[in-house]
Image (tube, rainbow, N blue to C red):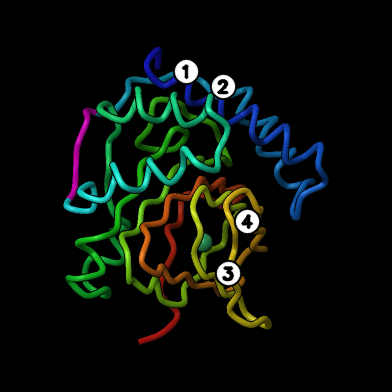
Amino acid sequence: MSGAAPVIEAIAALFRDKIAAGCEGAGSLESALQLLEQASPVAAPEPSVLPALRYWDEAIGLVAEAAPARLTTALREAAPAFHWRQNPNYLKTLDRDYLSGYAFTEFVGEVAPLAQDGLRVGLLLIGPDRHYPEHNHPAEEIYLPLTSASWWRAGEDWREVAPGQVIHHAPWRVHATKTGKAPLIALYAWLGEVARNAELTVA
Ligand SMILES: [Fe+2]
């Protein structure tokens, strides 16, 4: 846990800033923050990397332009210890090119340095020119993108979301993301039914 502590503290500080600013989903983010503050250290998973990590340096460089310095520094310093993985539901449904540019690591969750019932907190990395197709999940979700990308959710049009803008997805709301020329790094928090991974909603 010790290596992850500065990251957790920087994430909590960012959550507090967004809540204070009255961001989208502020009430849910407040719930996530309360759970985060109660999370228990557990044996951290071994570090692991995936092909998508070739985009890490570029992505974290973009984060440095937009995110609080405290968070960027904590992520840079802790990154060698991150355990990167992929949603097992996607291994047979998403194409090889997408999978070669996609990975996530969690700070609170089932495979993470902290555990807390009803909460997952992690970091999603998606390489350039990729489309994360429509999907949903029973957990409520809050995204804090740290770089720019296009986002869609059921009932709305695609929109460019700048770093720092908060996105809230109610349970089961279908959503999707596209990257352009730059990779995406986004923090996320899941609340509620967090054990069930996301599934694609398109063939
Ligand atoms: Fe989601």
**Please, what secondary structure does the residue beneath circle 1 have?**
helix
* Distance Cα–Cα, label 2 vs label 4: 22 Å
* Distance Cα–Cα, label 2 vs label 3: 28 Å
Which quarter of the rendering shows the C terminus? bottom left
* CB contact under 8 Å: marks 2 and 3: no
Q: Residue at x 64, y 62 (%)?
A: 169
In the image, residue 21 lies at what x, y percent? Answer: 81, 42
Instruction: Kindly report which numbered mark, 2 or 4, lies closer to the viewer in this rendering.
Output: 2
Is disc 3 surrounded by few (<14), some (14 to 19) or many (20+) residues within 10 Å?
Answer: some
* Distance Cα–Cα, label 1 vs label 4: 25 Å
Which residue is labeled 1 in the image?
5
Which residue is labeled 4 in the image?
140
In the image, residue 155 lies at what x, y percent? Answer: 68, 83
The correct choice, above or below, for 45 with respect to 157 in the image is above
- Badge 3 residue CB within 8 Å of ligand 1: no
The correct choice, above or below, for 119 with respect to 41 in the image is below
Residue type highlighted by circle 2: Glu
Which residue is labeled 2 in the image?
9
Q: Overall secondary structure of the magenta stretch?
A: loop
Residue type highlighted by circle 3: Glu
Q: Nearer the viewer, residue 106 or 162?
A: 162
Is disc 1 surrounded by few (<14), some (14 to 19) or many (20+) residues within 10 Å?
Answer: some
In the image, residue 202 lies at what x, y percent? Answer: 41, 84
Q: Which residues are magenta?
A: 46-50
- Badge 2 residue CB within 8 Å of ligand 1: no
Residue type highlighted by circle 1: Ala
* Distance Cα–Cα, label 3 vs label 1: 32 Å
Would residue 183 be found to the left or right of residue 194 on screen? left
* Distance Cα–Cα, label 3 vs label 4: 21 Å
* Distance Cα–Cα, label 2 vs label 1: 6 Å
**Disc assigned to residue 127:** none
Residue type highlighted by circle 4: Glu
